[in-house]
Amino acid sequence: MLYQTIVGTWPVQPMSGEQEREYCQRITDYMLKTMREAKVFTSWLNPSEPHEQAMTRFVEMVLSPANAAFRRDFGELASRVARYGVYNSLAQLAIKIGAPGVPDFYQGTELWDFSLVDPDNRRPVDYEKRRRLLENLGDPAELLEHPEDGRLKLFATTTMLKARRAAHDLFRCGRYEPLAIDGSAREHVFAFARVLGQRQAIVAVPRLVASLQPDGSAPTGEVWRDTRIAVPDDAPRCYRQAFTGECAAVIEEGGRRWMRAADVFARFPIALLEAA
């Protein structure tokens, strides 16, 4: 559990000495809470000081800068996991905003958030930093190349919330329609439409990206090969990708209407598609 926690919370940017000490304390506090609530060797009512001290020493040893061999090997693993975590996070974000219901955002999650359970997730949020980043989001391609500062997630969040606000009735009242996927990478796509009368929007996201892109690169463009996404019967001739402004054409094959996944994910790994 400790190692899973460290992998899931390891910062994407290098830490200063002070930040490393703070991180070690956060992990220690989390493990202490976990042990006490498990009530196996210690608990809130009957704390076992020897067990808790041993746990603290072990966490400090694991995270010590002097533990160079572990830090080197672990750093490589954490970096690889984080890269796929970016695509999973974006996919979850797109589904949350596009699916039926009210999208809920916990404080600070506009950027990558590595908070643990309370009280760790109640730390002050730097809203001024978020305002600054919001004013300088940049080009989607550049954001994909440098995801570590969180602008990529902020860009995706902002774009989808604006689209949702502009089509409020569609996302509030429109029916949910799952879309069929076909082709060699069909197991790696999830897509659905929101439909209200003649209006519609499509959300498409990648899944299981580690087996699709073993090198960790973004699942965009021709990596999708012959994969295609079915669209509703009354689909327009093309859909506009909200994140890039590009058009994904609708084609007819086998008596059905489709979009090529390579067009949908041409330059961005998630898609919100609106009638062009």
Image (cartoon, rainbow, N blue to C red):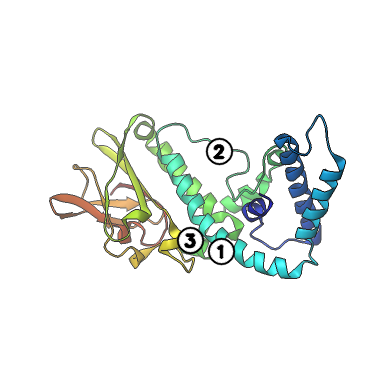
Left or right of 275 in this view: 145: right
| Of the pair 208 and 196, the residue shown nearer to us | 208
The answer to whether residue 98 is seen in the rendering is yes
**In the image, residue 51 above or below residue 24:** above
Q: Secondary structure at mark 1?
A: helix
| Residue that carries the numbered disc 3 in the rendered image | 139
Name the amino acid, label 1: Arg
Q: Nearer the viewer, mark 2 or mark 1?
A: 1
| Of the pair 233 and 247, the residue shown nearer to us | 233
Please provide percent x and percent y for residue 83: 54, 61
How crowded is the residue under tag 1: few (<14 C-alpha within 10 Å), some, or many (20+)? some
**In the image, residue 248 above or below residue 37:** below
Please provide percent x and percent y for residue 65: 79, 65
Name the amino acid, label 3: Asp
Using the image, tell me which numbered label, if any, was put on residue 105: 2
Which quadrant of the figure has residue 14? bottom right
Q: Nearer the viewer, mark 2 or mark 3?
A: 2
Q: Confirm or deny contact between disc 2 and disc 1 (CB under 8 A).
A: no
Q: Residue at x 77, y 66 (%)?
A: 67
The Cα–Cα distance between marks 2 and 3, rounded to whole angstroms, is 24 Å
Name the amino acid, label 2: Phe
Q: Earlier in the sequence, mark 2 or mark 3?
A: 2
Q: Secondary structure at mark 3?
A: loop
The Cα–Cα distance between marks 2 and 1, rounded to whole angstroms, is 26 Å
| Residue that carries the numbered disc 1 in the rendered image | 80
| Of the pair 126 and 74, the residue shown nearer to us | 74
Left or right of 107 in this view: 144: left
Left or right of 3 in this view: 86: left
